[in-house]
Image (cartoon, coloured by chain):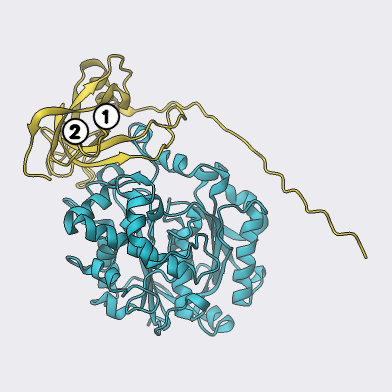
């Protein structure tokens, strides 16, 4: 059954800063302002056309509480309707869902979602560790680092094949990142580095190595969502929001290990619900490009199977056969993904931004080669929260 | 010709905040911590509907969403179901000090628990050649106990006892 909405919302403006390990040339509101100005220019709007600003980051990183009060200098929300959201790593995806809801409900005509992080200004692993419940998990947690998925994938497919596939995925992501001037880590990796890196990159936890893991980045992203009327007025090539789905579970049940044992993963549950509501029976045929929140190349590899509802080793084959490359049959992360750039509060919004650019045909050097009618974006956060957003070139009926 | 503008120094403000905290544990978690401290017992609560254990206990069953008001002693031995050998020197949030590496954490199915009701704690052994799924381990309690996760020092290998079957 379709989700109830009063009208459709479309993405008509996108802005993102250059992602970097150090943005010490600007303060937080100045960095936000860069993304906001670019999004407004892209939409052909001024801040006066925006009715509502939805702001999000993870304040536990920079330890600035109610950061929207400071950032208002940069995001232009002064005097407008607004709300601040923070849902961990999914923050950016939640911002997009909220902006869609605010437009689709009829409450506002133009809503701007703004996500940001300046991880350089705080302590990332310390912040994530303090997300765990303070009565037990806080003393045990190591940020978002875990090698359990690497262990499981190696157990299922053999050590050699698993290590090769995860590192090949990492190299494909870097090849995509080399096409995206705005992302953070662009190494120029080549296929002949796959085997040496799988053995020599410094280990973080088990077989999760430094090169597999996402970066800590500074950056901001802004996306403008508009009603059908406003989209027609301002934009020739909108990306329409078809639907979105959020799934999460109680923390201690789902936390990193045991996620796939007795109960379905949150990723698979989100995909099943979203696809069932929207007539997606063969996601790799009906969806043209997937921008996946890949916190590490082990999780990225494993999660392809969950999100695309695959069985067996299909997901490994997609990597081994280069299906997921930018010119492949089912491109994944033409942006370079989260392993290339990760300003956490903006990260999941950047996934939506990339999916929308692919639908709009505005991704430039990292535009996929095939026609894009439908794109999927995912968000991931804290305790296996999963968010999916489906975008289309055609306005949903 | 005007002189070239000198490059502006962008000043970085360096700050450290340190916040003493005290968290109420509540009657459910509080009972669990009290049993650890006073009796060196690991208590799980059990869902009256599905029979799952939760350890540490939470007020309601995460699956059935009913009050989990039954109590059982579980452990102190169990079997490793997942583990992590950690090489990254992350800060201990209770002290701010970098942890000694490598160290190991495991998700342990304690005797008396079923399904994925794993108990998450440190292992004594961190040699990746000696830690494996299926390994039988037992809780070692600290002499000084305060009603905290650290009342269990770690889980140590039970020599010569392997549950078998698991690799």
Q: Position of residue A249 (x, y in %)?
A: 29, 50
Where, quadrant-wise, is the C terminus of chain A in this rendering? bottom left
Chain identifier for the cyan-coloured part of the image: A
The chain under label 2 reads: B
Q: Is residue A84 left or right of residue B88?
A: right
Quadrant location, the N terminus of chain A: bottom left
Q: Is residue A238 above or below residue A160?
A: below
As displayed, is residue A24 above or below residue A136? below
| x and y percentages locating residue A159 in the rendered image | 21, 55
Badge count: 2
Q: Quadrant of residue A37?
A: bottom right
Q: Seen from this angle, which residue lies furthest left?
A: B164
Disc 2: which residue = B45
Q: Is residue A104 left or right of residue A323?
A: right
Which chain is drawn using yellow? Answer: B
- Name the mark on residue A9: none
User: Is residue A64 visible in this depiction of the protein?
Assistant: yes
Q: Which mark is residue B28?
A: 1
Of marks 1 and 2, which one's residue comes earlier in the chain?
A: 1
Q: Residues within 10 Å of mark 2 (few under 14, many from 20)?
A: many
Provide the secondary structure element on which disc 2 rests.
strand
Q: Residues within 10 Å of mark 1 (few under 14, many from 20)?
A: some
Q: Are marks 1 and 2 on the same chain?
A: yes
Question: Considering depth in this image, is A366 or A61 the residue closer to the camera?
Answer: A366
């Amino acid at each position: 059954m379709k989700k109830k909405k009063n009208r459709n919302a479309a993405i008509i403006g996108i802005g993102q800063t250059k992602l970097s390990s150090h943005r010490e040339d600007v303060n937080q509101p100045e960095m936000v302002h860069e993304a906001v100005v670019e999004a407004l220019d892209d939409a052909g709007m001024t801040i006066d056309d925006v009715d509502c600003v939805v702001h999000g980051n993870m304040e536990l990183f920079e330890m600035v509480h109610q950061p929207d009060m400071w950032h208002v200098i940069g995001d232009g929300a002064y005097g407008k309707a607004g709300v601040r959201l923070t849902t961990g790593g999914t923050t950016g995806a939640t911002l997009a869902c909220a902006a869609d809801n605010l437009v689709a409900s009829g409450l506002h005509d133009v809503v701007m979602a703004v996500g940001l992080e300046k991880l350089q200004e705080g302590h990332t692993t310390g912040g994530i560790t303090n997300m765990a419940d303070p009565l037990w998990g806080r003393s045990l947690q190591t940020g978002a680092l875990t090698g359990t998925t690497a262990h499981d994938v190696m157990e299922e497919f053999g050590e050699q094949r698993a290590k090769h596939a995860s590192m090949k995925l990492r190299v494909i992501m870097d090849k995509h990142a080399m096409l995206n001037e705005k992302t953070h880590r662009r190494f120029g990796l080549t296929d002949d580095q796959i085997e040496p890196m799988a053995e020599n990159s410094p280990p973080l936890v088990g077989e999760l190595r430094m090169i597999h893991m996402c970066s800590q980045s500074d950056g901001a992203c802004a996306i403008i969502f508009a009603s059908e009327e406003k989209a027609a007025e301002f934009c020739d090539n909108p990306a329409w929001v078809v639907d979105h789905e959020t799934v999460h579970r109680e923390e201690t049940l789902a936390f990193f290990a045991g996620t796939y044992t007795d109960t379905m993963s949150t990723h698979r549950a989100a995909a099943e619900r979203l696809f069932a509501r929207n007539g997606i029976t063969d996601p790799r045929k009906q969806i043209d490009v997937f921008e996946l929140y890949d916190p590490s190349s082990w999780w990225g590899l494993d999660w392809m199977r969950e999100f695309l509802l695959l069985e067996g080793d299909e997901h490994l084959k997609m990597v081994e056969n280069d299906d997921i490359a930018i010119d492949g049959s089912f491109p994944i992360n033409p942006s370079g993904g989260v392993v290339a750039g990760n300003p956490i509060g903006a990260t999941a919004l950047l996934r939506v931004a990339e999916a929308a650019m692919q639908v709009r045909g505005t991704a430039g050097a990292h535009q996929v080669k095939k026609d894009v009618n439908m794109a999927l974006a995912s968000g991931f956060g804290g305790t296996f929260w999963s968010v999916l957003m489906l975008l289309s070139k055609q306005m949903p009926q | 010709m005007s002189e070239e503008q000198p490059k502006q120094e962008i000043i970085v403000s360096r700050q450290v905040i340190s916040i003493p905290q005290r968290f109420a544990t509540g009657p459910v978690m509080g009972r669990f911590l009290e049993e650890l401290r006073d009796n060196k017992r690991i208590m799980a609560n059990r869902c009256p509907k599905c029979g799952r254990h939760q350890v540490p206990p939470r007020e309601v069953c995460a699956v059935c969403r009913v009050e989990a008001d039954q109590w059982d002693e579980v452990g102190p031995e169990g079997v490793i179901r997942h583990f992590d050998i950690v090489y990254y020197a992350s800060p201990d949030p209770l002290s701010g000090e970098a942890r000694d590496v490598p160290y190991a954490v495991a998700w342990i199915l304690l005797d008396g628990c079923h399904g994925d009701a794993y108990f998450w704690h440190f292992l004594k052994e961190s040699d990746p050649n000696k830690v494996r799924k299926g390994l039988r381990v037992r809780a070692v309690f600290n002499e000084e106990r305060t009603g905290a996760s650290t009342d269990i020092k770690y889980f140590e290998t039970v020599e010569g006892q392997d549950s078998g079957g698991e690799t």
